[in-house]
Image (spheres, helix red, strand yellow):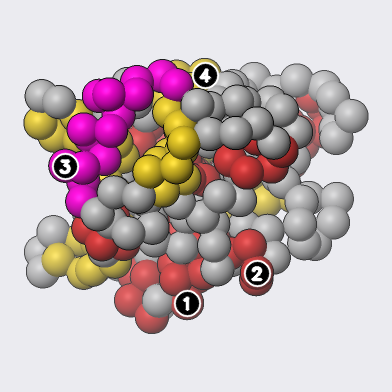
Amino acid sequence: MRRFHLALPRSIEDCLKLLAERGPEAKLVAGGTDLLPQMKNGLIKPAAVIDLSGVADLRVLRREDGAGLRVGASVAAREIELDPYTRSAYPALAESGALVGSVQIRNLATVGGNLCNAAPSADMAPPLVALDAEAVIAGPKGRRRVPMAAFFTGVRQTVLGPDELLVEFVIPSPGPRSGGSYLRHTPRRELDIAVVGVASQVTLRDGGVCAKARIALAAVAPVPLRATAAEQSLEGQAVTPDRIKRAADLAIEAARPISDQRGSADFRRHLVRVLTRRTLTTALARASA
């Protein structure tokens, strides 16, 4: 591994100062489960590494009355997996956290790292997109919010500038009679990345009519994306098995998969249909409970 300068800031303001000084030559590290292997393999060679482990404001995991959930960028996937409130109110997010690597990796890997690495297969991206979460980004001009649906700009690319820092995610309360689910397909049960991942979120009103639906797909395009036509086919309708099947068929139209060594484009389209149907069925059951 090439030599680099290591900085240990204690606050968000210190991080921003370091980023302003170092710019594109610096990389941020929290858990290091993505960054360090890339450095060891020579894929990236930063002149400076900024260690975020000492910045307490990035480790917030807190329920906000009437405002949903705040998840700091340095919160570990294992915390998301085990947090009782997250498991109850945001089950799709907890399920995605439980699928990141092994237990040892989840104790280190952070939500922010999983998202900023911006792999198309990132497990924690679809639930955040489906939950209408926003990323809070700090920079030299202050803070801004970006919907997670617009956070990714390409493979391993995000809206973050070289002088900006991802601070946290703000996830609105799903409200009563809401349910969500996240599933993925992998060749192995553990330590693998999604061939396809799907998150579904459903909110019902009186009579079992769907007031709001969100379906987010991973690993079928350069960025995680929403299946908006499938969502619209459910909203304002009673959610029946036939309508779930129709939405699963429509979700395929949003996918833009490629064929590679892990699966063909046709296989990925098939998985979109299957996982959309399963996650919608589970989300509906949870919303109806």
Residue at screen point 33% across, 76% down: 85
Is residue 175 depicted above or below 138 in this figure? below
N-term-proximal mark, 1 vs 4: 1
The residue singled out by tag 3 in the image is 13
Residue type at numbered disc 1: Leu
The residue singled out by tag 4 in the image is 154
- The quadrant holding residue 88 is bottom left
Q: Which residues are drawn in magenta?
A: 11-25
Position in image of residue 161 (x %, y %): 32, 21
Query: Callout 4 environment at 10 Å: few (<14), some (14 to 19), or many (20+)?
Result: some
Q: Is residue 86 magenta?
A: no
| CA distance separating discs 1 and 4 | 31 Å
Q: Nearer the viewer, mark 3 or mark 4?
A: 3
Q: Nearer the viewer, mark 2 or mark 4?
A: 2
In what quadrant of the picture does the N terminus appear?
A: top right
Residue at screen point 52% across, 19% down: 154
The residue singled out by tag 1 in the image is 82
Dots 3, 1 in contact, CB < 8 A: no
Secondary element at tag 3: helix
Secondary element at tag 2: helix
Is residue 6 depicted above or below 205 in this figure? above
N-term-proximal mark, 3 vs 2: 3
